[in-house]
Image (cartoon, rainbow, N blue to C red):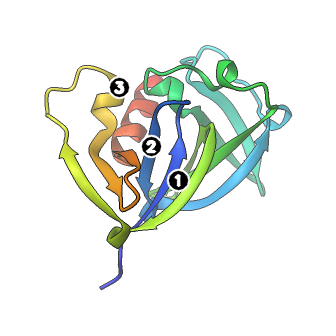
Amino acid sequence: MSEEKYLSFYLSSKIDGMIETSELREIVKLEDSSILPLFDLAPAIMGVFNLRGEMVWLVDLPFLLGLQPLSTQTCLPNYSVMIMVQENQAIGLACQKIGKLFSSKEIQTTSLVSSNMFTNFEACVKSKKTTLEGDNFWLLDFQQILNLVNNKK
């Protein structure tokens, strides 16, 4: 049986996220100039970009979750993007910065989230995880994120 892996990332200066790597295809750095903006879509959808001939939707993950948009968090002209895949559909989740890769042996669940979800952030959180060093991360549910994105298109 293989061990689960988790990738940490920064949603804002105070909120760290984590996602299971089972649907993670790759991580890329993307310059602002590589993004083709699309109009008449939700503001959290930044546009599309070309990834080796494949057009991939790009989502401002913090903004989608109800946090501060990436454009106001940093003055850097590039983004860290997690390319996630489900049912042969790729989507890019842009975040402030990619953190570390953790194995399931290095983290523990410290709290589960109630089913009474009121915000996009709460709706996408599976649980709170704590590393052996004491760092806290919110484990996000990619399926819930994908549902939010599909509802915004």
**Residue situated furthest top in the rendering:** 40
Quadrant location of the N terminus? bottom left
- Residue 153 visible to an observer of this rendering: no
Q: Is there a contact, CB below 8 Å, between mark 2 and mark 3?
A: no
User: Could you say whether the residue bearing mark 1 is in a helix, strand or loop?
Assistant: strand
Sequence-wise, the earlier of marks 3 and 1 is: 1
Is 89 placed above or below 16 here? below
Eye-nearest disc, 2 or 1: 2
- Residue 32 visible to an observer of this rendering: yes
Is 1 placed above or below 47 here? below
Q: Is there a contact, CB below 8 Å, between mark 3 and mark 1?
A: no
Mark 2 to mark 3: distance in Å? 14 Å
Towards the viewer: 99 or 70 = 99
Q: Amino acid at mark 2?
A: Gly
Q: Amino acid at mark 1?
A: Met
Q: Which mark is residue 120?
A: 3
Q: Position of residue 129 (x, y in %)?
A: 31, 51
Mark 2 to mark 1: distance in Å? 15 Å
Q: Residues within 10 Å of mark 1 (few under 14, many from 20)?
A: many
Q: Which mark is residue 17?
A: 2
Is 19 placed above or below 2 here? above
Which residue in the structure is indicated by mark 1?
84
Q: Position of residue 75 (x, y in %)?
A: 78, 25
Q: Amino acid at mark 3?
A: Asn
